Image (cartoon, helix red, strand yellow):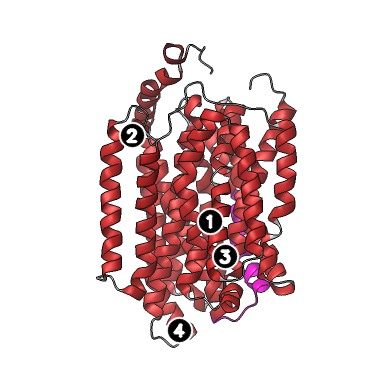
């Protein structure tokens, strides 16, 4: 990658960001369309949860497999397959005749999506080898999430109100085709010097763990916590977790290398990613239903209401990248934790929904926090790891994000459904039912604050250095016969 010109590097970054844009835009657009989809498909709250979580579950389950496969057979190759599958899945979603088919086609989208973000981040990591350049590139990467948050509700609202909810999937087609053409033309092939071997058993255990936990949470309000179905999910989850720990610890080349988690910053980034994205998905889920089903706004007006959150997320993401590059991850993580928890507290303790100024204040605070949190997560996850394992390291961070997103929708939706069971459906009933969910979002913000503080000091950096020294031999000449790349 060292022979690439600066112009070519920036072009590669742009192409990788396009893949992130279609994946992120798809999620934010879908949230605005949920009420219209619910009415058209006659779906329950649980049904709407599955349109989101079927996607995020498959995505989270396959991210590490996609990252390690890309390291092994070629990142460009896997990235191309991902673009094709995601674009094709989007077209199928727009044609879905029922909720079941929509969920199935969302899963096809997710298979493609699993090959995009971690592989794109791996390409960026191997393209921008200087730590400062990499941090700035990751800041740009984070800004794309902000763009999707700003544009998604507006584009989604406009399309839903004018054409219908099926049109929200059409926007992925031109972006996906353009990304495909540019990838074929400009992105060079790269692969790890010493890629990990396939680990199908570990992959199945991860899928069993994530699937059973999310299914149990979503279906618990209707089935009952003590029902055989939910107890069976708990048993599968516990067995999968125990099996995963026991099996992976004995493998020479596990799907998830336990040594990664000896680095306190890496472990902290994993916890922070789960917490931050659980808060984000829960935040969007609650506000979409509230603004449209309770306040009676149409999809476009609901998107405009959430614009302050999206705008501040967009503005703060590049600032976060620069702060990470110049001062490290601690400051943006601490500010993110304070603002996200403060936003949740406004809704949990002060019923921000009942006052438009306080509502907008909560949106602004959450936008600032989410805009600041993304770059430190990504940078910390890949920093100190051998470049040969960049795909796996980036995939762990991406898996944490998607796992958090799935759990956020599952938990918040389950709490809301339980609170609304037998309720009147009034604004007051919704606010009361949502209050426990807002406390959960507040706790997620506090976790970002506390874990960010604990894993960004000098002690934590020392654990990252020790981990890097322990992992580096796998990428070095002693194991691969290749000269080390720095």
Badge number at residue 428? 4
Crowding near the residue tagged with mark 1, few <14, some 14–19, many ≥20 C-alpha atoms within 10 Å: many
The dot on residue 258 is 2
Residue 310 is one of the magenta-drawn residues:
yes
- Say which label, 1 or 3, has the lower sequence index: 3
Left or right: residue 317 versus residue 272 is right
Who's the residue at 70% across and 48% down the image? 176
Earlier-in-chain disc, 4 versus 3: 3
Considering the whole magenta stretch, tell me its main secondary structure.
helix
Part of the protein shown in magenta: 294-316
SS of the residue under disc 2: helix
- Camera-side mark, 2 or 3: 3
- Give SS at disc 1: helix
The residue beneath circle 3 is 102
The mark closer to the camera, 2 or 4, is 2
Distance CA(mark 2)–CA(mark 3): 36 Å
Q: CA distance from mark 4 to mark 3?
A: 32 Å
- How many numbered discs, if any? 4
Q: Which residue is mark 1?
A: 107
- Residue 373 counted in the magenta span: no
């Amino acid at each position: 990658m060292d022979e690439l010109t600066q112009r070519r590097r920036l072009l590669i970054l742009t192409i990788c960001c396009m893949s992130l844009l279609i994946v992120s835009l798809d999620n934010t657009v879908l949230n605005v369309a949920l009420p219209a989809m619910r009415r058209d498909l006659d779906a329950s709250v649980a049904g709407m949860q599955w349109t989101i979580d079927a996607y995020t579950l498959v995505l989270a389950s396959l991210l590490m497999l996609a990252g390690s496969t890309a390291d092994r057979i070629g990142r460009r190759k896997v990235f191309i397959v991902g673009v094709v599958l995601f674009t094709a899945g989007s077209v199928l979603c727009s044609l879905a005749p029922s909720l079941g088919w929509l969920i199935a086609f969302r899963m096809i989208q997710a298979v493609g999506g699993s090959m995009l973000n971690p592989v794109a981040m791996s390409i960026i990591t191997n393209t921008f080898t200087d730590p400062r350049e990499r941090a700035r590139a990751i800041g740009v990467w984070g800004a794309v999430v902000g763009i999707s948050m700003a544009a998604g509700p507006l584009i989604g609202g406009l399309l839903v109100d004018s054409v219908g909810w099926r049109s929200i999937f059409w926007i992925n087609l031109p972006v996906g085709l353009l990304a495909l053409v540019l990838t074929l033309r400009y992105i060079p092939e790269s692969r790890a010097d010493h890629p990990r071997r396939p680990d199908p058993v570990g992959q199945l255990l991860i899928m069993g763990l994530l699937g059973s936990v999310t299914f149990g949470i979503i279906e618990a309000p209707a089935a009952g916590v003590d029902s055989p179905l939910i107890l069976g999910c708990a048993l599968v989850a516990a067995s999968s977790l125990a099996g995963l720990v026991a099996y992976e610890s004995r493998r020479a080349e596990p799907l998830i290398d336990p040594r990664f988690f000896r680095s306190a910053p890496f472990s902290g980034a994993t916890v922070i990613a789960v917490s931050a994205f659980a808060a984000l998905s829960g935040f969007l889920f609650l506000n979409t239903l509230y603004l449209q089903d309770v306040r009676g706004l149409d999809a476009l007006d609901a998107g405009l209401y959430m614009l302050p959150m999206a705008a501040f997320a967009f503005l703060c993401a590049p600032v976060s990248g620069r702060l990470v590059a110049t001062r490290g991850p601690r400051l943006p993580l601490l500010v993110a934790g304070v603002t996200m928890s403060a936003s949740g507290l406004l809704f949990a303790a002060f019923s921000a929904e009942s006052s438009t100024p306080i509502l907008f204040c909560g949106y602004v605070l959450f936008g600032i926090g989410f805009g600041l949190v993304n770059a430190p997560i990504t940078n910390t996850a890949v920093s100190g790891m051998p470049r040969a394992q960049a795909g796996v390291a980036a995939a762990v961070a991406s898996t944490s994000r998607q796992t958090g997103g799935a759990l956020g929708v599952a938990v918040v939706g389950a709490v809301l459904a339980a609170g609304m069971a037998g309720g009147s459906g009034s604004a007051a009933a919704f606010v009361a039912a949502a209050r426990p969910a807002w406390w959960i979002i507040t706790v997620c913000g506090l976790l970002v604050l506390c874990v960010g503080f604990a894993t960004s000091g000098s002690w934590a950096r020392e654990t990252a250095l020790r981990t890097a020294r322990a992992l580096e031999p796998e990428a070095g000449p002693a194991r691969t016969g290749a000269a080390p790349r720095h």
